[in-house]
Image (cartoon, helix red, strand yellow):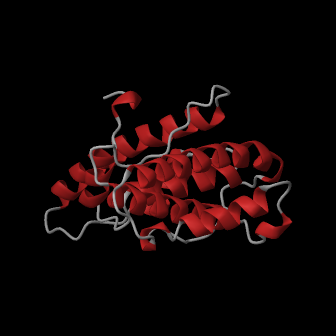
Amino acid sequence: MTEADIHYDEISDALRRIGVEQDSAEVHGALCGLFCTVGGLQADYWLDTMITPVPEDDALIVDALSNESRALLTLLFNQTEKQLSGNDFEFELLLPDDSAGLYGRVEALGHWCQGFLFGLSQGGLTDPEGLPGELPEIVKDLVEISRAESYELDDGNADENDYMQLVEFVRVAVQLFVEEMQQFQVAEPESDADYH
C-alpha cells in the first residue's frame, strides 16, 4: 500500500478496529493541529497518544489488528507530513469522497475542524488571540465551521458549492497556520491527553 492509496473509509476501518471512537476526519484534523504546534512531531508519539487497547480476549488478534492499523495510520502520518511541509499546495483534508451525501461530508468537515482545534490545544496553544496575523480570526472561523453539522442543508447546488468553498478555505487556512506557526512550535508535549 502506498500513501496515494489512503482513503477516508480505510482510515475509519483502521480506527474502529483499534477502538478509536473519533472518525477519520477528526483524527486527521487533530494530527494537522499537532503538526502546526509541535516541531519534529514523530509518528510514534501521535499513535501512542491516540491508540488504546481493544477489549478482546485473544491478545494475538488484538496485536494483529493494532499492527495493521498502526501501519496504515503511519502512512497517513507520513503523507500528511509530506503534504504540509511541501511548497506545492498539495495538502488535502481527509474527508469522505463526493459519493457520500452532502450532510455526511459537512458533518465530517465539522469534525475535522474540531480535531484541528483539539490538536492545536494538545500541542500547547492556549491563547489563540496571541497568534500572529490573521490566525486569531481563522481560529474563530474554524470554531464556527466545527459546528457545521447543525446547519440546515437541502442538498442543492448552492449548498454543494458552499461546502466546496468551506473545504478550500480550511485547506488554505491550515497551510497558513503551518507557515505562521513554525516560529512558535514546541517539542512533543508531555500531556497524557488522548483522542478518546
Assign the C terminus to one quadrant of the image: bottom left
Q: Is residue 141 left or right of residue 72?
A: right
Expressed as whole percent of the image width and height from the top left, the position of residue 70 reads: 36, 47
Give above or below for 30 relative to 8: below
Residue at the (43%, 41%) spot, across then down:
76
Question: Relative to 109, is 132 on the left or the right?
Answer: right
Query: Splitting the image into 4 quarters, where does residue 153 fall?
Result: bottom left
Residue 71, image x and y in percent?
Answer: 35, 41
> Quarter of the image holding residue 142?
bottom right
So how many labels did they put on this image? 0
Q: Residue at x 40, y 30 (%)?
A: 3
Q: Position of residue 44 (x, y in %)?
A: 50, 49
Q: Quadrant of the N terminus?
A: top left
Q: Is residue 101 above or below residue 83?
A: below
Q: Nearer the viewer, residue 196 or 70?
A: 196
* Residue under the image location 35 percent in, 48 percent down: 96
Instruction: Identify the residue shown where x is 45% and y is 52%.
Output: 158
In the image, 19 versus 181, the foreground residue is 181
The answer to whether residue 186 shows anywhere in this view is yes
Residue 6 image point, x, y percent: 35, 37
Residue 47 visible in this rendered orientation of the protein: no
Is 114 left, or right, of 15 in this rendering?
Answer: right
